[in-house]
Image: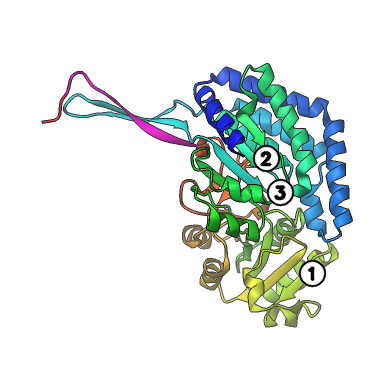
Amino acid sequence: MQKLGADARLAAGTLAHASAKAKNAALLAAAAALRADKAAILEANAKDVAETKQAGDATAAFLDRLTLDEARIEAMASGLETVAGLPDPVGEIMAEWSRPNGLRIRRVRVPLGVIGVIFEARPNVTADAGGLCLKAGNPVILRPGSECFHSAHAVLERLRHGLKLADLPETVVQIVPTRDRAAVGEMLKMTDSIDIIVPRGGKSLIERVIQESQIPVLRHLDGICHVYADRAADLEKAQKIALNAKMRRPGICGAMETLLVDAAIAERFLPAALRALAEAGCEIRGDEKTRSLYPDAKAATEADWSTEYLDAILSVRVVDGLNDAIAHINRYGSHHTDSIVTEDEAAAKIFLDHVDSAIVVQNASTQFADGGEFGMGAEIGISTGRLHARGPVGVEQLTTYKYLVLGDGQVRP
């Protein structure tokens, strides 16, 4: 672990001053290698999936996050190409001004430093995090979950192929070479080598990182996401959005976990909407009013309102209008992504202004909570805190800044 850190710190000095041309060349070559070597990547992933199934305790949603196919490899490659096409943030002048004494001051973007990413069963994080960190000038140390160990290494080989072709240090992207959980604890103490930790995974992983880390943490907390069907909602639109928000991929952090419905439309909306969700394979847990309108729903408990299922399970509550919906979200939500479906622009504005989440959506699925969908190419995570970034963390969010003060002999009186 100490050697990984030392190699990353050494690479940081080179990468911080690498040209945009070299970084983009590495990204494009890596994308080409992902496509050319997809058979090898799929073979490694099949080994991970087989081992996980043999262990016998993985949910369908967990296996979905773990599994790669040709489309997901193409998405990784396309994401790297999109990142390559973004403006290079390093060296950007964010602001510039002069003082009465003649000093000229500039605020300029610089890399954050060495980034440590600890993630679970999502092998695409290897490409997403590696590509974004490279573009922003940051070496990265990746600690994948044991379930995607082989897949992550297969993707890493293609990233390193790109780095080699661009004459950049291959140690710009490294993977912890062991599945031993003790490596996580060691990583969280590497204050001389790692500047920021980004955890991506379940609640237990996030809590451990927050409790044990001696390094600043960019928090990616639970995705307890809501869709609120307002009294002025287009019911067909609301049903379509709810079905997509829950069932497109139930195991991602942007999946809806709670559906809130205004009492004024509950009788017209809920029976058909919940039937469609159930037919798609979703288990419904509802409050008393929901169950009276849809008797097949199980009774929701207090714990359901603050649970990230990451599975085909949905809690449903009938609320007394817009303010009640906002209060519920701000109490039980995780400040990730929440959506309102309404044709009332005044109601939408209140919701957008008063819901305290990193991403607040009007008339669209919560599953758009994704750096790729935001035009960032990829994301290293969705930050639900307020420091240092919030929402999808892309290239720009992986930089900090410094001040350049340009004088001509001035001294302070």
Res 276 → quadrant: bottom right
Using a 10 Å C-alpha cutoff, classify the residue at mark 3 as few (fewer than 14 neighbours), some (14 to 19) or many (20 or more): few
Q: Name the kind of residue labelled 3 in the image.
A: Asp
Q: Is residue 403 magenta?
A: yes
Snapshot colouring: rainbow
Q: Secondary structure at mark 1?
A: strand
Res 246 → quadrant: bottom right
Point out the stretch of residues depicted in magenta. Answer: 399-410
Q: Name the kind of residue labelled 1 in the image.
A: Glu
Where does the image place residue 165, in percent across and percent down from the top left?
Answer: 68, 17
Viewer-nearest of discs 3 and 2: 3
Viewer-nearest of discs 2 and 1: 2
Q: Secondary structure at mark 3?
A: loop
Q: CA distance from mark 3 to mark 2?
A: 9 Å
Which residue is nearer to you in this view: 281 or 144?
144
Residue picked out by circle 3 = 180
Residue picked out by circle 2 = 176
* 88 shown above or below 370: above
Q: Is residue 411 magenta?
A: no
Mark 2 vs 1, N-terminal side: 2
Which residue is nearer to you in this view: 31 or 13?
13
Q: Name the kind of residue labelled 2 in the image.
A: Val
> Which mark is drawn over residue 283?
1
